[in-house]
Amino acid sequence: MPKTLQVKKLSKRFSGLQALSNVNLQLEKEEIMGLIGPNGSGKTTLINSISGVLHPEAGSISIGNMDVTGWKSDKIARLGLARTFQTARLFFSLTVIENLELGIMAASRYDVDDKVDELLNRFGLERWAMDRAGTLAYGLQRRLEIARAVGSNPEFLLLDEPAAGLNEDESENLLQLIRGFRDPAGLGCGILIVEHDLAMIMRLCDRVHVLNEGQTLAEGSPEAVRSNHAVVEAYMGKRYTASDHGSALT
Amino acid sequence: MLKNWSRRRVTSAFHTFWMLALVLGIISVAAAVIDDRSITRLVTDFMTLCVLVIALQSFIGNSGIISFGHVAFFGIGAYSAALLTITPKIKAIALPALPVYIQQMQVSFTVAVLMGACLSLLVAIITGLALSRMAEGAMAMATLALLVMLHSIFANWEQVTRGTIGVYGIPRNITLFNTWICAAVVGGAALLFKASPTGLCLQASRDDPLATGTLGVSVAKTRFAGWVLSAILMGAGGAMWAQNNLAFGPNQFYYAETFNLLSMLVIGGICSVTGAIAGVAVVTLVGELLRGLENGLSIGTWVTLPELPGIVQMSIACLIIVVLIIRPQGMLGLNELSDFVYKRRMTKKNT
Ligand SMILES: Nc1ncnc2c1ncn2[C@@H]1O[C@H](COP(=O)(O)OP(=O)(O)OP(=O)(O)O)[C@@H](O)[C@H]1O
Ligand SMILES: [Mg+2]
């Protein structure tokens, strides 16, 4: 039976602020789920909670038949969950190769040097192999962070705004890569992706989960979500004027 | 487990290792050829300091957490070497309260160094279990507490350490050859650790502990490993030091020595084993050059420089400030000796 990542009734408070309340979410393998919502709606908090960086007050998280609620991030990662951060968190004083090695480490079933070469090649990072991560251009840093995350062949991959700050070509490239991760012939990952570019979400995702002020507003196929009025209201209301509703989501 | 070892990094560590061992070897051979007592003493002091600063580097450099407590392991190594190498005759007079089997024991240089390392290891395991679970800042402060704790033990456990009076009569077992071997072995161990998967994880946690955790690495376990390894090396260094210094008291393992070792490391480059050695070399040279000035100097009959006590200390302090301004990461920065050779080769390939 294929594994699933299951989030049940998750709630997280920051002192006075309810960042997440009662969020349910289920991610299958070989599935791409979009996570959208206005700024401050709790998307990053959800990813932090699933990956063990934050510990929620209520609710449960399970991977396959393992209940991982309250586990530390390293233990969850070893179970096959990888993530990236909203702003790249690389090991800036280490080289590209060393960053990639660290991504592979959790899996501990590869020959490190061979696997690093493969990743360098697949992500087109050979030219920078010996450079320190801190000296790379922004787009390359993002690419390296993703390469590091998939190095251990994770079963679930959480991407927090991977396309932020990338130009059009780079975004297109990224989209192809992400599709490749999902492909059963590749990693067969279940992917949760946070993204503000709705056009990209619509093209990429099998399902979309919408958060607003820490609560689930809608979940369903991209088409269903696109035509959901509550979503248009909440998600777009803050960014666009009412007259833009029609075109905003196309 | 061996699967996570990268041939690339082990190879480059090995290159650095043989180059450093060669340089240290040349220094030893040169001193042996010159065969002057004060030069020999200078070189054995230098090698011993190299061991101590490399040991310090292997924790501070890789973890990025400052430790004020390592001099405690230095002391543990020194006292264990003293108790194990002083002749039974002197021990009977100076340390009559020692258990008989320790009183009658007298071991060789190598055994004393190994025992110093083992005792340090024990204390490091006990303290490390607590320390490695702390946040970075708290851990640094706790190492300071460790220094104070061990110092009060050294200063008050009179049956074993003779308290503030200190111990004496340690045989001078050190030679140019065995200090060189120790410095090379300890340097090699530090380089190998840095190249190991655990060492790499520790360096990752230096940059970003949170991200290190999300890659499946237990930061606490990694820090524990670094702590224990560097304590072993420090204990070995302490045992060497005792057999070079012959008599000492508890105040030699306190703030002054902590800052002395830290200053060498900061000048040379915290993140680099090569840097640790370079830092010791620079501070030793500056010290030697200025030592004359400290006692006053007469040039001919006309010019007489006054005594300048403290000039060495002050110059080293100034040196730290200058290095921190010009190269905040120390002289060597993040580089090892092999990086200079290696990098040039890589760039050639690419162009
Ligand atoms: N560590 C924290 N301490 C206190 N408040 C926090 C913390 N992290 C997040 N918050 C708050 O929780 C809310 C949700 O934040 P979160 O970062 O999850 O939003 P987001 O959906 O990722 O937003 P964005 O699109 O801007 O990335 C915000 O109001 C934020 O200010
Ligand atoms: Mg966010």
Image (cartoon, coloured by chain):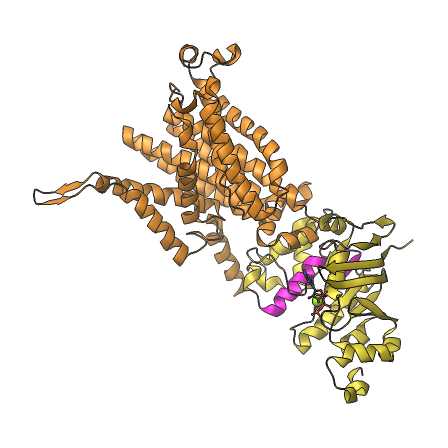
Chain colours: A yellow, B orange
Task: Give the residues in magenta.
Answer: A136-162
* Residue lying farthest to the right in this orientation: A1
**Ligand 1 lies in which image quarter?**
bottom right
Q: Residue at x 68, y 45 (%)?
A: B218
The image shows residue A72 at horizontal and vertical percentages of: 73, 48
Q: Residue at x 79, y 64 (%)?
A: A192
The image shows residue B10 at horizontal and vertical percentages of: 57, 45
Q: Residue at x 79, y 61 (%)?
A: A186
A20 versus B12 height, above or below:
below
In the foreground, A243 or B63: A243
Q: Residue at x 58, y 62 (%)?
A: A128
* A136 with respect to B74 (left or right): right
The image shows residue B289 at horizontal and vertical percentages of: 26, 43
B253 versus A166 height, above or below:
above
* Residue A34 figure quarter: bottom right
In the foreground, A226 or A90: A226
A42 versus A222 height, above or below:
above
* Residue A90 figure quarter: bottom right
* A70 with respect to B284 (left or right): right
The image shows residue A115 at horizontal and vertical percentages of: 69, 53
Is residue B9 at least partly visible in the picture?
A: yes
Is residue B234 at least partly visible in the picture?
A: no
Q: Is residue A153 magenta?
A: yes
* Residue lying farthest to the left in this orientation: B301
* Residue lying farthest to the bottom in this orientation: A243
Picture quarter with the N terminus of chain B: top right
In the foreground, B40 or A8: A8
Q: Is residue B263 magenta?
A: no
